[in-house]
Image (spheres, helix red, strand yellow):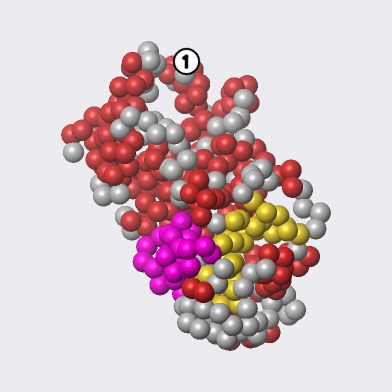
Amino acid sequence: MMNDFMENGIFKISECRKIAVMGGTFNPIHYGHLVAAEAVRAEFGIERVLFIPTGRPPHKALSVVAPDEQRYLMTVLATAANPYFDVSRMEIDRKGTTYTIDTLRELKKICRPDAQIYFITGADAVNEIFTWREADKLLDMANFVAVTRPGYDKKRLEKNNSMYYLEIPALAISSTDIRDRVKAGKTIKYLLPESVEEYIIKFGLYKNDVAGELVRKIKERLSSVLTNKRYIHTLSTAREAAKLANIFGEDTSKAYIAGLLHDCAKDFSHKLRIEKCKEYNIYLDEVLKKQPDLIHSFLGGAVAEFEYGINDREILDAVKYHTTGRSNMTKLEKIIYLADLIEPERREFDGMKEIKNAAYSDLDYAMLLSLEGTIRVNRERGRLIHPLSIEAYNYYKSK
């Protein structure tokens, strides 16, 4: 087995004209991953397939992820029998949050100038690619291969000429299902290599994955009630929230959930918003009545509680106040407020760079800048400003 681009029988990675990258959490790796990698190798004439276990991707903040070293070792065990498969530690050894763009840039430096790189991803992740950091550059740096199971509804996929699609029979197997089976005490035999199964049993992995299951259910519901554009913004906000939480020592799980749910009521019709406010006893003050777009955050807190089953008050308040803010906000509330503003998919606005730079070092100063800008713009447009926003601005101005 290769130790990061060392010679391994046939070619060094640096000598290959065609390589494929199989990135993933591999939590755990299973036959679906292996079959997909081999199918892509055969279909596109790939000389080496490089498996790269992820390090700290923000979108996985809520899953019960096995430690980096264990996921790496399971990947080594699973791929050892295939002479065309190699495993790299480049992402798990990289400090900070893991981004695919950084991995591709590192590979570009190692590979020969004329090398073609194919990046293998699951069909369900295709739409999420457009929320990844520097997504436009990603599609220029590699050929993306979306592997799908037979019968997959391709209408759900974003159409893109830079994307290849390949049907793989074994993709009904999923890491989530394997973790669920382990948690429930069910057999996982024949879903993954025996060596990986023995490793999971030996180290008692995946006994509890409550958070990961909650995220899966939230995403499934949001994808059906939000527009595609809103859903992409939601995923990007959740990732940005997890990133900020990691910087400031906040619970990344809570930040990710709050980021996912912050706009859960945003695409409700005005009529439905009013009906839901009556159902959940949400008081509509004069500003909310005259500017109903502000309702979604207050309503979102109630929807998150009663329709998504969230009972953590910090998360619910972060959703509730993510648009207006308020004085003396919790750290999580500030993180969600700011993540919504500076997430990478949001169109750049005046002062955005300054707010983003501040958000990574001083949440209070970033709040002051964002509230100041919001109040100024709303006044210029003749819009009402909610009293909570005025209170928040005065609070952070006085700090």
| Residue 375 visible, this angle | yes
Which residue reaches farthest left? 398
Inspect the image, locate mark 1, and give the three-letter code of the amino acid beneath it.
Lys
Residue 25, relative to residue 354: is it above or below? below
| Residue 213 image point, x, y percent | 61, 59
| Residue 172 visible, this angle | no
Q: Which residue is at the front of the view, 199 or 314?
A: 199
Q: For the stretch drawn in magenta, what is the main secondary structure?
A: loop
Taking the image as shown, residue 175 lies to the left or right of residue 376, namely right
Residue 173, relative to residue 303: is it above or below? below
Q: Which residue is at the front of the view, 317 or 51?
A: 51
Q: Residue at x 47, y 15 (%)?
A: 290
| Residue 211 image point, x, y percent | 55, 60
Which residue reaches farthest front? 114
Quadrant of the frame with the C terminus: top left
| Residue 50 image point, x, y percent | 56, 72
Q: Residue at x 74, y 47 (%)?
A: 154
Q: Residue at x 55, y 72 (%)?
A: 16
Taking the image as shown, residue 39 lies to the left or right of residue 209, namely right
Does residue 113 belong to the magenta stretch? Answer: yes
Residue 334, relative to residue 187: is it above or below? above
Q: Residues within 10 Å of mark 1 (few under 14, many from 20)?
A: few
Residue 112, relative to residue 374: is it above or below? below
Q: Quadrant of residue 184?
A: bottom right
Q: Which residue is at the front of the view, 252 or 210?
A: 252
Badge 1 marks a residue whose secondary structure is: helix
Write the start and end of the magenta stretch as one range.
88-115
The residue labelled by disc 1 is 290
Q: Residue at x 50, y 45 (%)?
A: 136
| Residue 61 image point, x, y percent | 48, 59
